Image: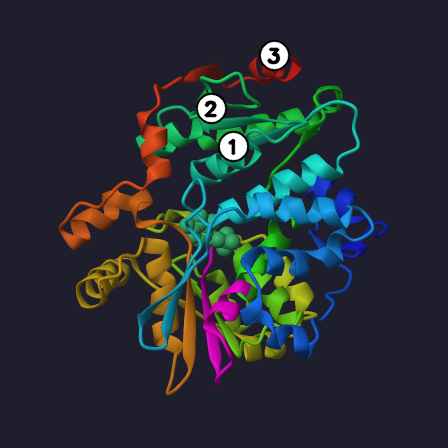
Amino acid sequence: MRFVTTRGGGRPLTFTEALLEGLAPDGGLYVPETIEPWTADEIARLPNRTLTEIGYRALRPYTKGELDATLFEALVVDALNFPVPLIEVEPGIFSLELFHGPTLAFKDVGARMMARLMASLDRGDRDLTVLAATSGDTGSAVAHAFHGVPHTRVIVLYPDGRVSPTQEAQLTMFNGESGNVRAYAVAGSFDDCHRLTREAFGDDALSSAARLTSANSVNVGRLLPQMVYYFHAVAQLGAPAGELLICTPSGNFGNLTAGLMARRAGLPVSRFVAATNANDVVPEYLERGVFTPRASVATIANAMDVGHPSNFERMLWLYGNDLQAMRRDIVGNRHGDAAVKATIRRVFDECGYLMDPHSAIAYLGLKQTLTGRQRGIFLSTAHPAKFREIVEPVIGTTIETPAPLAEALARPRHILRIPATLDALAVLLHV
Ligand SMILES: *Cc1c(COP(=O)(O)O)cnc(C)c1O
């Protein structure tokens, strides 16, 4: 399978090249040249398949010819080693729980697959160094995903004093081991962390000496694996019956884009709902036909505070810039903090089901769109315990700490501090 960029520049690449390059030189994003449809028979037999069987089937077309079938199968089994259950919250309304991985958020799926793909496909003679700046959650998904993966090491930069204590515990969890993952607290802001990684990537000597690569969320190796759980959701619903809507809580729109690609491959879904918080440039585009990126505004669903979503470019590519075609498949809506809190409360009281703010936006987006006898699935992207500061006051009770989080919090803290300079980072990269 060849990969091209959304802007049409350059020669087509192999999957390995697109994976290791991350961003395309023309500024576009890599996309597969074609999306092969599954046969009707394969779709009909989905309910008989396990998560990892579906993972293998969904992703095999993209790795064929580059990765041995048996190796790839083992890789999928190793990456998708946690359940992704579908829970009926109300009659006809289902939650797809994507938060049972090591960092309790859906980014574990893409990050774990990408880490293993990089380790298996890289033919370099020295370890790859993944360098990532984080404002919190993405960095810990990446750190946990690469932990213990051979031929790779990870350096995560986060702003000292500006992540939550829970986030810091998860980020620095491996600092006390002699392993391949280190997280450094940078004396500065998230923008400083980001600037440092840009400077390091821009320094050719440093970048090639350390074999730097990015684990950016736009990497096609993180995007494609997210198709898998859409098929797994439909598999768990059982035999198709009538119309189905799927609602994805969106920020950078990678998750939704993967769903759209799954549909192109034959996923039997009538329509997607793109639900956002106040950062609603995509719902606005769907309504008014104009795309106006702007500075992000802070909300209680902060992983979705994105004012200029990068994957919008992939959405336009999928629809050939045809707004009407996009409107047939996607409806957008946005939800404010007050409505989100009220919904968390109501669904907890009435159904005994607890949602984090991001998942609650997906629930709201679905509820607002479902009609008649349609069934609907909303994607639950984070465990409520990750956002306990918001959730506990809303429901008026404390919630249990899930095991992976308890383990991170129980470890002695090893905070490694560095100044916000390229020199300090270069020292770390050279060891
Ligand atoms: C990243 C994230 C999102 C948004 O996903 P995108 O693919 O960027 O649209 C939603 N919820 C949670 C919990 C996230 O971490």
- Quadrant in the picture for residue 338: bottom left
The residue tagged 1 is 143
Q: Determine the CA span between mark 2 and mark 1.
A: 8 Å
Residue at (64%, 39%) from the top-left corner? 116
In the depicted view, which residue is nearer to us: 343 or 119?
Answer: 119
In the depicted view, which residue is nearer to us: 56 or 223?
Answer: 56
| Image location (x, y in percent) of residue 4 | 78, 55
| Image location (x, y in percent) of residue 394 | 18, 53
Q: Is residue 83 visible?
A: yes
Q: Is residue 296 visible?
A: no
Q: Determine the CA span between mark 2 and mark 3.
A: 20 Å
Q: Which quadrant, please, contains the N terminus?
A: bottom right
Residue at (47%, 58%) from the top-left corner? 250
Say what secondary structure mark 1 lies in.
helix
Residue at (17%, 48%) from the top-left corner? 393
For the residue with label 1, is its CB less than 8 Å from the closest atom of ligand 1? no
Which range of residues does the magenta coloring cover? Answer: 232-252
Crowd class of label 2 (few under 14; some 14 to 19; many from 20; radius 10 Å): many
The residue tagged 2 is 174
Colouring scheme, one of rainbow, by chain, secondary structure, one colour: rainbow
